Image (tube, grey):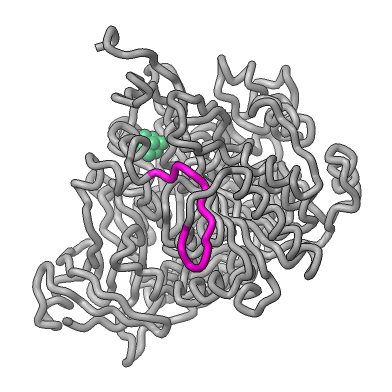
Amino acid sequence: RISDIDKRVRTSCGYCGVGCQMDLWVRNNQVVKVRGAGADVLPNRGRLCVKGRFGYQFLGSRERLRVPLIRKKGTFCEVSWEEALDYTAQKLAEIRDESGPDSLAGLASARCTNEENYIFQKFFRAAVGTNSVDHCARLCHAPTVAGLVRAFGSGAMTNPIEDLAGADCILVTGANVSETHPVTATYIRNARDRGAQIIVIDPRKIDLIQGSTLWLRPKSGTDVAWINGLIHIILEEGLADREFIRTRTDNFVALEEAVKPFTPRVVEDISGISEKQLRQAARLYGAASKSSIVFAMGITQHITGTDNVLSLANLAMVCGQVGRASTGVNPLRGQNNVQGACDMGGLPNVFPGYQHVSDPEIRLKFETAWGRAPLAAKTGLTVMEMMNSASEGRVRGMMIMGENPMLSDPNLNHVEASLKALDFLVVQDIFMTETSALADVILPAAAFAEKEGSFTNTGRRVLRVRKAVEPPGESRADWQILTEISTRMGYPMAYKNSSQIMKEIASLTPIYGGISYERLEDENLQWPCPSQEHPGTPFLHKEQFSRGKGLFHPVDYIPPAERPDKEYPFVLSTGRLLYHYHTATMTRRSEALNDFAPSAYGEINGEDLDRLGAGEGDLLKVTSRRGEIVVPARKSDRVAPGVLFIPFHFHESPVNRLTNDALDPASKIPELKVSACRVELV
Ligand code: SF4
């Protein structure tokens, strides 16, 4: 009852990139209940999924980190903040001074606020002197940014999430929306209930298929082939928007040539999709007046991730389905603030607002504002390059803020060896994780409900994060920790509060120029929002693309780096579950969620299980060229014969011991979605 609570605090969900607005009910410094914000509040209109509604119990977990820890003679010892901060600053400065700024590298965080990510990259660029800052966007949507920037001039979702409800046709590919972005799935269902055609193109029989018009099941890693095939049919059947192509795009002739070889027969040979289904999908998408494309990591986590995204951009432009409400190319960003962490320059090639580090004028602007010159002009290291450099001794020290690469990154045996090879590792987190267990210093941080700040959702909507409860023990907001270390390293940072940081962000980042806490009290603005008077931008590329004309990219099909063979006959794919978030450090400490999905499993088709002489729950040994794990079997027709799916949340069966770290050359994303493996009964 409202009379029993001390206060209600409006804030943003700390889980996925939908950025649901919610009210936390607080009693005795504890969150006791969560409700969706009002039906008129975007982006979720009062809706919440099970994670947002029940996933807050981790806040009060007894396992929260409460005091700083330093490893002394192999054992973590509790120390004062003074000692931990002095020691961290001294070790980082020592390495920087001995081996140069590029011997240090940092992982920013898609879980932390915009303000914290801004301070993190500022610390590395101004206090340390390197651009080697990256974060887990490298493992999810780096190809989206690389691809959409080339095609359109902006790497973000073109339209807002809630816009999907108004579409006439939605093509969902490589996105298990009901589990990973559940509130987005409700908007897709709203569209379906209005009569929209829903096309799902996915190797896995995901829940969204129920009630959809069409489900196409391609083999993993064949996306360019079937997308080129769709374009081939759309051109052949006169469904292209020739006026849009003529007036708003460049390089169409090259695309036309590139898709010619992708006849339905060729596409069927490569992808397994029949001509009949491919034609149906092409007609539905091409003929609708408002068609929208929704995608996620099933498209991006491939060595051809950037090509896949470029192909989707080609498809949308051929049909003139960009620059209007309820159309567009819409990447669903995974974690709560992965969009914001990118916007804030948690990337090795750009300052906040995607302003390139190699541009002398941009550097001068930041040098002047930050009072530190010269800033490094060379692009820094990406996540996987940091790990490789650490194993070779070129990176000697790392700072990791709220990320857990020891469970989330591919080829974990290599990651483990790399982190162990470092001279110094400092981790800021809210729990002891597989990564912080390898650290020299662990600094206890505040969670989303314990601090002020902002997140930016997958639809470019900037949302306030508000403090509802005090952080446990001595833990502090990440930005406060960072400013203390920076000051000790000779680059003083003094901010009174996160609002002051947002003012600095707005002054240096044109797309956030009109964002302020004052305005965010009344409205959830979408960038670009360049001035105080600007109302924000619901959908991009209205009259012209951000780059001027949209640019077609002819793309050819390249198969995955690893394909099944005699020794490793299965295709291994990984992904997420509705009840867990990323490496499950928070959701597994929220009883209401963990009870639904307490342990790991491997989805395997019944035909394969029979062949192995195994049954439901039997332990399977899964081996790839990089490692082996044991996982209980779950019989399921969600996967085709010859395919194994394992969620990556569970440390007991860490599937990333098996995954392939082969990289997409354009975006440096590893091919997490396709590895070859062998499956045996234990
Ligand atoms: Fe939170 Fe995402 Fe669920 Fe919304 S859909 S409540 S943002 S996890």
Residue depicted at x 70% and y 48%: 121
Q: Of 263 and 467, which appears nearest the observer?
A: 467
Residue 268 figure quarter? bottom left
Image side of residue 384 versus residue 564, left or right: right
Residue farthest toward the top in the current orientation of the protein: 3
Give the quarter of the figure containing the C terminus. bottom left
Residue 138 figure quarter? bottom right
42 relative to 641, above or below: above
Residue depicted at x 56% and y 65%: 669
513 relative to 132, above or below: above
Q: Position of residue 269 (x, y in %)?
A: 38, 78
Q: Of 32 and 203, which appears nearest the observer?
A: 32
Q: Does the magenta stretch include residue 359?
A: no
Residue depicted at x 72% and y 47%: 123
Q: Give the range drawn in magenta.
A: 64-76
Q: In which quarter of the image is ligand 1?
A: top left
Q: Of 20 and 641, which appears nearest the observer?
A: 20
Give the quarter of the figure containing the N terminus. top left
22 relative to 98, above or below: above
Q: Is residue 196 visible?
A: no
Image side of residue 5 versus residue 499, left or right: left
Residue depicted at x 25% and y 81%: 679
Q: Of 288 and 521, which appears nearest the observer?
A: 521
Q: Where is residue 334 in the image (x, y as percent from the top left)?
A: 46, 48
Q: Is residue 382 visible?
A: yes
Q: Is residue 73 magenta?
A: yes
613 relative to 416, above or below: below
Residue farthest toward the bottom in the current orientation of the protein: 566
Q: Where is residue 277 in the image (x, y as percent from the top left)?
A: 33, 61
Q: Where is residue 42 in the image (x, y as percent from the top left)?
A: 46, 24
